[in-house]
Amino acid sequence: NAGVTQTPKFQVLKTGQSMTLQCAQDMNHEYMSWYRQDPGMGLRLIHYSVGAGITDQGEVPNGYNVSRSTTEDFPLRLLSAAPSQTSVYFCASSSPVWGLDGYTFGSGTRLTVV
Amino acid sequence: KQEVTQIPAALSVPEGENLVLNCSFTDSAIYNLQWFRQDPGKGLTSLLLIQSSQREQTSGRLNASLDKSSGRSTLYIAASQPGDSATYLCAASPLYSGSRLTFGEGTQLTVNP
Protein backbone atom coordinates (compact mmCIF):
# COMPACT_ATOMS: atom_id res chain seq x y z
CA ASN A 1 0.00 0.00 0.00
CA ALA A 2 1.24 3.47 -0.88
CA GLY A 3 2.20 5.61 2.05
CA VAL A 4 4.83 6.49 4.61
CA THR A 5 6.54 3.63 6.45
CA GLN A 6 8.36 4.17 9.74
CA THR A 7 10.55 1.66 11.54
CA PRO A 8 10.85 0.65 14.29
CA LYS A 9 7.44 1.18 15.93
CA PHE A 10 8.87 1.00 19.46
CA GLN A 11 12.38 1.47 20.80
CA VAL A 12 14.03 1.72 24.22
CA LEU A 13 17.47 3.31 24.39
CA LYS A 14 19.92 3.93 27.16
CA THR A 15 21.21 7.45 27.69
CA GLY A 16 24.14 8.11 25.37
CA GLN A 17 23.26 5.48 22.80
CA SER A 18 22.72 6.41 19.17
CA MET A 19 20.18 5.12 16.73
CA THR A 20 18.47 5.84 13.42
CA LEU A 21 14.74 6.10 12.89
CA GLN A 22 13.86 5.03 9.38
CA CYS A 23 11.28 6.69 7.13
CA ALA A 24 10.40 5.69 3.58
CA GLN A 25 7.66 6.85 1.20
CA ASP A 26 6.60 5.43 -2.13
CA MET A 27 4.51 8.32 -3.43
CA ASN A 28 7.39 10.18 -5.11
CA HIS A 29 6.84 13.12 -2.76
CA GLU A 30 9.54 15.77 -2.79
CA TYR A 31 8.82 17.12 0.69
CA MET A 32 9.59 15.05 3.79
CA SER A 33 9.74 16.07 7.44
CA TRP A 34 10.13 14.77 10.98
CA TYR A 35 8.00 15.82 13.96
CA ARG A 36 7.99 14.88 17.61
CA GLN A 37 4.82 14.78 19.67
CA ASP A 38 4.90 15.41 23.40
CA PRO A 39 1.98 15.79 25.86
CA GLY A 40 0.96 19.41 26.23
CA MET A 41 3.26 20.59 23.44
CA GLY A 42 1.65 19.23 20.31
CA LEU A 43 3.69 18.27 17.26
CA ARG A 44 6.91 20.15 16.68
CA LEU A 45 9.06 20.15 13.56
CA ILE A 46 12.56 18.68 13.95
CA HIS A 47 14.01 18.71 10.41
CA TYR A 48 12.60 18.86 6.92
CA SER A 49 13.67 18.35 3.33
CA VAL A 50 12.39 19.82 0.06
CA GLY A 51 14.20 17.28 -2.11
CA ALA A 52 17.11 14.87 -2.35
CA GLY A 53 20.27 16.48 -1.03
CA ILE A 54 18.45 19.40 0.63
CA THR A 55 17.62 19.54 4.34
CA ASP A 56 16.90 22.27 6.85
CA GLN A 57 16.29 22.68 10.55
CA GLY A 58 12.90 23.02 12.12
CA GLU A 59 11.84 24.23 15.55
CA VAL A 60 13.66 21.62 17.71
CA PRO A 61 16.70 20.29 15.77
CA ASN A 62 19.25 19.93 18.57
CA GLY A 63 20.43 16.37 19.16
CA TYR A 64 19.15 15.14 15.79
CA ASN A 65 20.73 14.72 12.37
CA VAL A 66 19.20 14.03 8.97
CA SER A 67 20.25 13.41 5.39
CA ARG A 68 18.31 12.89 2.18
CA SER A 69 20.23 10.88 -0.37
CA THR A 70 17.16 9.62 -2.24
CA THR A 71 13.63 10.89 -2.81
CA GLU A 72 12.18 7.89 -0.97
CA ASP A 73 14.15 7.86 2.29
CA PHE A 74 14.61 10.38 5.08
CA PRO A 75 16.28 8.83 8.17
CA LEU A 76 16.48 10.64 11.50
CA ARG A 77 19.59 10.04 13.59
CA LEU A 78 19.83 10.51 17.35
CA LEU A 79 23.48 11.20 18.01
CA SER A 80 23.59 10.64 21.80
CA ALA A 81 20.17 9.86 23.25
CA ALA A 82 18.93 11.84 26.26
CA PRO A 83 15.82 11.30 28.41
CA SER A 84 14.44 14.58 26.99
CA GLN A 85 14.21 12.83 23.63
CA THR A 86 11.61 10.41 24.94
CA SER A 87 8.71 11.10 22.60
CA VAL A 88 6.64 9.84 19.70
CA TYR A 89 8.24 10.60 16.35
CA PHE A 90 6.31 11.04 13.15
CA CYS A 91 7.59 11.23 9.61
CA ALA A 92 5.52 12.94 6.92
CA SER A 93 5.68 13.54 3.19
CA SER A 94 3.89 15.78 0.71
CA SER A 95 4.00 17.00 -2.83
CA PRO A 96 4.68 20.59 -3.83
CA VAL A 97 2.01 20.18 -6.49
CA TRP A 98 -0.92 21.48 -4.51
CA GLY A 99 -4.38 20.26 -5.16
CA LEU A 100 -3.40 16.74 -4.28
CA ASP A 101 -3.64 15.13 -0.87
CA GLY A 102 -1.62 17.40 1.37
CA TYR A 103 0.50 15.71 3.99
CA THR A 104 0.68 11.95 4.63
CA PHE A 105 1.99 10.76 7.99
CA GLY A 106 3.60 7.53 9.07
CA SER A 107 2.25 5.56 12.03
CA GLY A 108 4.98 6.80 14.35
CA THR A 109 7.91 5.53 16.42
CA ARG A 110 7.50 5.53 20.19
CA LEU A 111 10.93 6.12 21.71
CA THR A 112 11.84 5.81 25.38
CA VAL A 113 15.26 6.88 26.62
CA VAL A 114 16.19 5.59 30.08
CA LYS B 1 6.70 32.92 14.04
CA GLN B 2 3.42 31.20 13.29
CA GLU B 3 1.37 30.12 16.27
CA VAL B 4 -1.68 27.90 15.96
CA THR B 5 -4.27 27.64 18.73
CA GLN B 6 -7.20 25.26 19.02
CA ILE B 7 -10.21 25.85 21.21
CA PRO B 8 -11.61 24.03 23.10
CA ALA B 9 -8.90 21.65 24.28
CA ALA B 10 -11.55 19.03 25.05
CA LEU B 11 -15.19 18.61 24.12
CA SER B 12 -17.78 16.03 25.16
CA VAL B 13 -21.11 15.85 23.31
CA PRO B 14 -24.04 13.45 23.01
CA GLU B 15 -24.39 11.41 19.84
CA GLY B 16 -26.21 13.18 17.02
CA GLU B 17 -25.12 16.68 17.94
CA ASN B 18 -23.63 19.05 15.37
CA LEU B 19 -20.39 20.60 16.57
CA VAL B 20 -17.70 23.10 15.64
CA LEU B 21 -14.00 22.91 16.38
CA ASN B 22 -11.99 26.12 16.17
CA CYS B 23 -8.46 26.81 14.95
CA SER B 24 -6.77 30.21 14.93
CA PHE B 25 -3.39 31.24 13.53
CA THR B 26 -1.35 34.37 14.07
CA ASP B 27 0.22 34.80 10.61
CA SER B 28 -2.33 35.03 7.81
CA ALA B 29 0.38 34.44 5.16
CA ILE B 30 -0.35 30.74 4.88
CA TYR B 31 -0.15 28.43 1.89
CA ASN B 32 -2.80 26.04 3.11
CA LEU B 33 -4.43 24.63 6.23
CA GLN B 34 -5.02 20.96 6.92
CA TRP B 35 -7.20 19.17 9.45
CA PHE B 36 -6.14 15.80 10.84
CA ARG B 37 -7.64 13.17 13.08
CA GLN B 38 -5.56 11.19 15.58
CA ASP B 39 -6.85 8.16 17.45
CA PRO B 40 -5.12 7.20 20.74
CA GLY B 41 -1.71 5.66 20.13
CA LYS B 42 -2.05 6.05 16.38
CA GLY B 43 -0.74 8.27 13.60
CA LEU B 44 -2.41 11.22 11.90
CA THR B 45 -5.11 10.77 9.30
CA SER B 46 -5.74 13.65 6.91
CA LEU B 47 -9.35 14.84 6.88
CA LEU B 48 -9.47 18.01 4.81
CA LEU B 49 -6.99 20.30 3.08
CA ILE B 50 -7.93 23.92 2.33
CA GLN B 51 -5.68 25.83 -0.02
CA SER B 52 -5.19 29.53 0.68
CA SER B 53 -7.34 30.51 -2.31
CA GLN B 54 -10.28 28.43 -1.07
CA ARG B 55 -12.92 29.28 1.52
CA GLU B 56 -14.07 25.78 2.45
CA GLN B 57 -13.84 22.08 1.79
CA THR B 58 -16.35 19.31 2.43
CA SER B 59 -16.06 15.58 2.88
CA GLY B 60 -19.11 13.64 3.96
CA ARG B 61 -20.24 14.96 7.36
CA LEU B 62 -17.19 17.20 7.66
CA ASN B 63 -16.92 20.79 6.48
CA ALA B 64 -13.86 22.97 7.01
CA SER B 65 -13.79 26.71 6.41
CA LEU B 66 -10.90 29.15 6.15
CA ASP B 67 -10.88 32.90 6.77
CA LYS B 68 -7.34 34.15 6.32
CA SER B 69 -8.19 37.76 7.11
CA SER B 70 -9.30 36.85 10.62
CA GLY B 71 -6.78 34.04 11.04
CA ARG B 72 -9.41 31.40 11.67
CA SER B 73 -10.50 27.99 10.47
CA THR B 74 -13.39 25.89 11.70
CA LEU B 75 -14.18 22.21 11.36
CA TYR B 76 -17.88 21.44 11.40
CA ILE B 77 -18.97 17.88 12.16
CA ALA B 78 -22.60 17.08 11.42
CA ALA B 79 -24.62 14.43 13.25
CA SER B 80 -21.72 13.29 15.42
CA GLN B 81 -21.20 9.58 16.11
CA PRO B 82 -19.24 7.69 18.81
CA GLY B 83 -16.76 6.71 16.08
CA ASP B 84 -15.89 10.39 15.69
CA SER B 85 -14.24 10.32 19.12
CA ALA B 86 -10.58 11.26 18.58
CA THR B 87 -8.21 14.20 18.78
CA TYR B 88 -8.56 16.70 15.94
CA LEU B 89 -5.51 18.71 14.90
CA CYS B 90 -5.20 21.66 12.56
CA ALA B 91 -1.92 22.64 10.92
CA ALA B 92 -0.84 25.55 8.72
CA SER B 93 1.96 25.74 6.17
CA PRO B 94 3.72 29.02 5.42
CA LEU B 95 3.30 31.06 2.27
CA TYR B 96 5.64 30.11 -0.60
CA SER B 97 6.64 26.94 1.21
CA GLY B 98 4.42 23.97 1.74
CA SER B 99 7.31 21.96 3.07
CA ARG B 100 6.50 22.21 6.76
CA LEU B 101 3.56 22.50 9.12
CA THR B 102 2.85 24.33 12.36
CA PHE B 103 0.35 22.42 14.49
CA GLY B 104 -2.17 23.38 17.12
CA GLU B 105 -2.33 21.24 20.25
CA GLY B 106 -5.59 19.68 19.21
CA THR B 107 -9.15 19.27 20.45
CA GLN B 108 -9.96 15.97 22.15
CA LEU B 109 -13.51 15.06 21.15
CA THR B 110 -15.67 12.50 22.93
CA VAL B 111 -19.05 11.59 21.46
CA ASN B 112 -21.21 9.76 23.99
CA PRO B 113 -23.76 7.14 22.87
Image (cartoon, coloured by chain):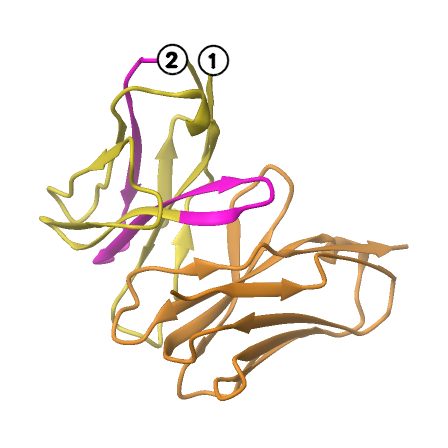
Horizontally, residue B1 falls left or right of residue B17, namely left
Judging from the image, what is the letter of the chain drawn in yellow? Answer: A
On the rendered image, what quadrant is the C terminus of chain B found in? Answer: bottom right
- Residue name at image x 62 percent, y 64 percent: B6
Near-viewer residue (B47 or B97): B97
Report if residue A10 is visible in the image.
no
Horizontally, residue B60 falls left or right of residue A76, namely right
As drawn, the residue found furthest toward the front would be: B1
- Residue name at image x 51 percent, y 65 percent: B4
What is the display colour for chain B? orange
Q: Are marks 2 and 1 in contact (CB under 8 Å)?
A: yes
Dot 2 amino acid type: Thr
Q: Earlier in the sequence, mark 2 or mark 1?
A: 2
On the rendered image, what quadrant is the N terminus of chain B found in? Answer: bottom left
- Report x, y in % for residue A35: 39, 45
Q: Is residue A3 above or below residue B64?
A: above
The image quarter in which residue B106 lies: bottom right
Q: Is residue B40 above or below residue B4?
A: above
Near-viewer residue (A22 or A112): A112
- Report x, y in % for residue A86: 47, 26
Q: Secondary structure at mark 1?
A: loop
Q: Which residue is mark 1?
A: A114
Q: Which residue is mark 2?
A: A15
Near-viewer residue (B16 or B52): B52
Horizontally, residue B37 falls left or right of residue B103, namely right
Q: Which residues are magenta?
A: A15-44
Q: Is residue A94 above or below residue B41?
A: below
Was residue B37 drawn as part of the magenta stretch in this picture? no
Q: Secondary structure at mark 2?
A: loop
Horizontally, residue B96 falls left or right of residue B77, namely left
